[in-house]
């Protein structure tokens, strides 16, 4: 189970560790101008490489006046004098807790691991991009978590554990995906004109909390599963790339991926581990979403797929659910690349 960190001392500790990680990995420092909608400022910037046209960079600092930890991420040329534009901000409050900043830290209360997260607060120009649209369009890991301040559930986007050796790559992938999603939304080039056309949020709204992945007990018996859980969005994106030529791809906050074909609709649910809780949840989501979709696509076959990692328990799970009409699809994630089994239609 995950919980939003609201204690500013805990935030400061996590921020210090994150900064040390990034400084150690981004060794090429330059003094550059960083631009934002209302102006610019000069600061020390850490680049991933010493040269190149599209090199990842990060700037971290503490704003004493505004009482905020700054984490700016972007891409640019280390040896150019042009202004660097920010792709995404992971800012955090330093004195008084507030959710007005884009960044957040999340704790896995089972393992104690701290995860860098984001609230979906994104701007383009002087305008803020619709947060709900970001959650719908971006292929990143979305979670509804508890808060240290009470029982309210908080929508969050997971990036990576702050101890992840590939944290630079994770932040880079996440930033690009969110920025691409923001551009699509701002330019009116969404994945479909109206998500409600096929994946009406109201249709599943009553079921969403009931099948929330954070309801009940979640057992993490191996540390790597925490990292894998942050990869959910990357796995969905890899899946989307494979089905590009199959039909029209759509999704909603509740449905990972839907592919509309002439005579069938392919329904995919992605899980990042093979724990009993994940399998039970995945089966339940597929059966109920599939039943609901029959009302939207009359006389059309709904084909459900459960996508899980190829672990030791894969064959056993396959035998158990074979009689449910659900096709099991496996993948292997080595941290850099995702190898997904070919989908058989």
Image (cartoon, helix red, strand yellow):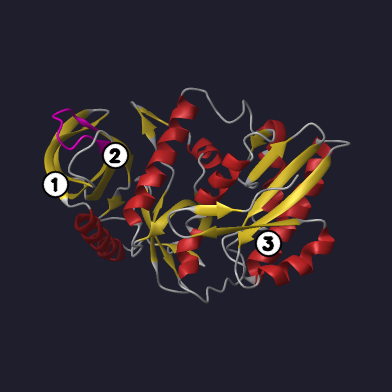
Q: Which dot marks residue 74?
A: 2
- Image x and y of residue 112, in percent: 40, 72
Residue at 76% across / 40% down in the picture?
A: 265
- Residue 152 visible? The answer is no
Task: Classify 47 as above or below 197.
Answer: below
Residue at the extreme top of the image, as rendered: 187
**81 drawn magenta:** yes
Q: Is residue 213 left or right of residue 231?
A: right
Task: Classify 68 as above or below 195.
Answer: below
Mark 3 closeness class: few <14, some 14–19, many ≥20 residues within 10 Å: some
SS at circle 3: helix
Contact between labelled residues 3 and 2, with CB atoms less than 8 Å apart: no
Mark 2 closeness class: few <14, some 14–19, many ≥20 residues within 10 Å: many
Q: Which residue is mark 3?
A: 281
- Image x and y of residue 284, in percent: 74, 59
- Residue 323 visible? The answer is yes
**Displayed quadrant of residue 82:** top left
Magenta: main secondary structure equals loop
Residue at 21% across / 60% down in the picture?
A: 20
- Image x and y of residue 302, in percent: 80, 44
**Displayed quadrant of residue 137:** top right
Sequence-first disc among 2 and 3:
2
Give the label, 2 or 3, closer to the camera.
2
Task: Classify 20 as above or below 112.
Answer: above
Give the label, 1 or 3, closer to the camera.
1
Q: CA distance from mark 2 to mark 3?
A: 37 Å
SS at circle 2: strand
**216 drawn magenta:** no
Sequence-first disc among 2 and 1:
1
Residue at 56% across / 61% down in the picture?
A: 272
Q: Which residue is mark 1?
A: 29
Q: What span is colored magenta in the figure?
A: 75-84
């Amino acid at each position: 189970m995950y919980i939003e960190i609201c204690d500013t001392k805990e935030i400061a500790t996590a921020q210090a560790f994150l900064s040390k990680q990034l400084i150690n990995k981004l060794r090429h420092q330059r003094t550059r101008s960083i631009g934002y909608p209302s102006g610019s400022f000069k600061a020390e910037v850490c680049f991933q490489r010493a040269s190149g046209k599209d090199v990842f960079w990060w700037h971290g600092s503490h704003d004493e006046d505004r009482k905020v930890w700054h984490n700016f991420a972007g891409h640019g040329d280390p040896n150019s004098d042009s202004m660097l534009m920010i792709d995404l901000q992971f800012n955090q409050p330093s004195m008084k807790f507030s959710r007005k900043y884009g960044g957040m830290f999340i704790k896995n209360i089972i393992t104690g691991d701290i995860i860098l997260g984001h609230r979906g607060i994104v701007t383009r120009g002087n305008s803020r991009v619709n947060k709900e649209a970001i959650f719908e369009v971006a292929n990143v890991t979305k979670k509804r978590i508890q808060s240290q301040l009470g029982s309210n559930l908080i929508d969050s986007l997971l990036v990576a554990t702050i101890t992840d050796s590939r944290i630079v790559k994770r932040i880079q992938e996440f930033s690009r995906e969110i920025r691409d999603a923001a551009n699509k939304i701002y330019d009116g080039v969404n994945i479909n004109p109206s998500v409600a056309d096929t994946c009406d949020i109201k249709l599943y709204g009553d079921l969403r909390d009931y099948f929330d992945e954070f309801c009940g007990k979640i057992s993490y018996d191996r540390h790597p599963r925490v990292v894998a859980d942050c990869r959910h969005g990357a796995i969905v994106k890899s899946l989307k790339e494979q089905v590009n030529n199959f039909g029209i791809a759509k999704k909603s906050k509740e449905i990972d991926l839907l592919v509309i074909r002439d005579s069938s609709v392919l329904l995919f649910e992605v899980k990042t581990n093979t724990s009993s809780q994940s399998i039970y949840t995945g089966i339940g989501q597929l059966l109920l979403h599939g039943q609901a979709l029959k009302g939207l696509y009359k006389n059309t076959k709904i084909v459900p797929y459960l996508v899980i990692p190829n672990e030791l328990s894969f064959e056993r799970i396959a035998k158990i659910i074979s009689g449910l009409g659900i096709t099991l699809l496996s993948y292997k994630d080595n941290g850099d690349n995702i190898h997904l089994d070919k989908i058989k239609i």
